[in-house]
Amino acid sequence: MTNNDVLRKIRFIYDLKDDAMIKIFSLGGLNVTRAEVSDWLKSDKDEAYKALKDPALAQFLNGFIVKLRGKKEGAEPVVETKLNNNIVLRKLKIALNLQAEDILATLQLADFRLSKSELSAFFRKPDHQHFRPCKDQVLRNFLQGLQNKHRPK
């Protein structure tokens, strides 16, 4: 999944308007304009489409955490320069305050089965022997499960 896909999906699931998106980016430490947000949300085929860079999505996800969970005491969170599906899934888990059982239940809403040990492998450090990269299919189904939960047909 592209960063733009993730941003579009989160916007749709939580019915976020442009002002809310701008506010979330600012909570993550990035000031953006309505035009930038609009360009990131456009279809890949649109001429005005702009690719969302990893640090910008990381700041949006950090802002999403702050919006839903509140600002954490201490130092500002580090903005990742390179994102992968494991990091995106971890940030969504933190923002939504989900436990492993909640994530598995959300995946089941999208008719996707995963064991608890398979899920825990996504949250391990990359140099751990049982680390497993999170594939697009898992992230896509997780977001689809969230959509089924929050925006039923």
Image (cartoon, rainbow, N blue to C red):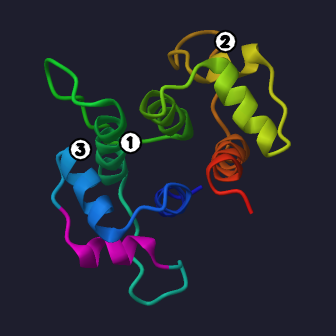
Q: Nearer the viewer, residue 143 or 77?
A: 143
Q: Which mark is residue 7?
A: none
The span from disc 2 to disc 3 (Cα, nearest Å) is 31 Å
Q: Amino acid at mark 2?
A: His
Q: Identify whether 11 is placed above or below 86.
A: below
Which span of residues is magenta-colored?
A: 32-42
Whether 38 is among the magenta residues is yes
Residue lying at 78% horizontally and 42% vertically, measured from the top left: 109
Please determine whether, in this image, residue 29 is positioned above or below residue 98: below
Q: Amino acid at mark 1?
A: Lys
| Callout in the foreground (2, 3) | 3
Where is residue 79 drawn, in percent x and y? 26, 37
Q: Is residue 71 visible?
A: yes
The residue that mark 3 highlights is 28
* Tag 1 residue: 82
Q: How far apart in space, not on screen, are marks 1 and 3 (Cα)?
A: 16 Å
Q: Is residue 74 left or right of residue 8?
A: left
The answer to the question of whether label 2 and label 3 lie on touching residues, with beta carbons closer than 8 A, is no
* Residue annotated with mark 2: 130
Q: Quadrant of residue 19?
A: bottom left
Could you tell me which secondary element the residue under label 3 belongs to? Answer: loop
Residue 116 or residue 98, whichever sits in front: 98
